[in-house]
Amino acid sequence: MSEPGRTREVALVFLRLGTVAFGGPVAHTAMMREELVRRRGWVTDERFVDLMGATNLIPGPNSTELAIHLGFDRARWRGLLLAGLCFILPAALIVTGLAWAYVEHGDTPSAEWLLHGVVPAVLAIVAWALVALLPTVVKSVWLGLLAAAGLAAYLLGVSELIVLFGGAAVAGLARLASRPGAARQALLAPLAVVFPDPTAGQLAQLFLTMLKIGSVLYGSGYVLLAFLEGDLVHRLGWVTEGQLLDAISIGQVTPGPVFTTATFLGYLVAGLPGAFLATVAIFLPSFLFVGLLTRITDRLRSSPWTSVMLDGLNATALALMAGVSWRLGRDALVDGWTVGIFGVTLLLLWRTELNSAWYVAGGASAGIVLGLLGWS
């Protein structure tokens, strides 16, 4: 395919994924694997899990960074920009609309009936991806044990970051133990850029605050909540605790990155200009970090030392996906209808190669029908 054709393909694929990617980072990752590895063959499973593991080394929204990196693999720098922008744009527009409704009417439309159908379908996509990635990631018995240990640690409440970097460290130590004469190379330090607090102008202060958060934030949406609470509620006093929780909820139930919570808060603070600047600021570091990461990802795999640590990181990353999926499943698969949607989606994944948007649309349609029938 020609370069313009690849660029257009990247834009269309990630625009569609950004529109239907409900369920958070784990679900986004599974949908990208289904669409770009299984259906389109852009990358191999081996390359996919390496990119997935590498994005865990840097701050920011990992599924968005994975999209950016996959765009770079497909269409170089234009692909990098378009993949990220197109994945973010649908959610940013939806969240801006919901923020307007919130400001004008004091509430946002309920999507509970829709999510009852969408979430089981998304969980099936995640489960299918986990099974497919298992032989690629767990290449030996000891990597299987490492993944099992990572899953157990996560379910016991250990921080995701400790699980991820612990997997890389254990893999590195195991290599060191097996090769006493091996060079002792330090683990790659997480990239972080700390920006000073702004001092002039509400829009400038909003932009720099979100830029700072996007530059240093590791972890889940709960970590994002802590950062936003510290800056926007306590330090600046721009929003209340209740408004912050409403913003986090909107980020969770809309498709695309959870970081579009910043879009909602930016609108509350300064209307449309605030929504735009907050969105640009919180995602901008991801583009910069992935741009730097493209320079070293291949070297991570080519070096025997960093390759084994990347294997450990990938194993524990897969374990985290499984742990998050287990917890989501306990909350989402609550009756015969949701279990049925989950099962039918799994069957379709096994027997067809449909675009992942159809599975999500099917779940949404089932949720709408059940809602109209009075199911709750």
Image: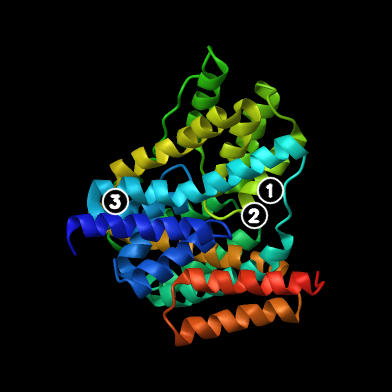
Say which amino acid is labelled 1.
Ser
Q: Which residue is mark 3?
A: 79
Say which amino acid is labelled 3.
Gly
Q: Can you tell which quarter of the image residue 287 is in?
A: top left
- Number of residues whose C-alpha sits closer than 10 Å to that of mark 2, classed few (under 14), some (14–19) or many (20 or more): some
Q: Residue 327: where, in percent of width, then height? A: 66, 65
Q: Quadrant of the C terminus?
A: bottom right
Does the CB distance between marks 1 and 3 fall below 8 Å? Answer: no
Q: Residue 349: where, in percent of width, then height? A: 48, 81
Give the numbered dot on residue 249.
Answer: 1
- Rounded to the nearest whole Å, what is the CA distance between mark 3 and mark 2? 27 Å
Q: Residue 319: where, in percent of width, then height? A: 52, 65
- Rounded to the nearest whole Å, what is the CA distance between mark 2 and mark 1? 6 Å
* Nearer to the camera, 48 or 103: 103
Q: Residue 371: where, in percent of width, then height? A: 76, 69
Q: Which residue is mark 2?
A: 253
Q: Quadrant of the N terminus?
A: bottom left
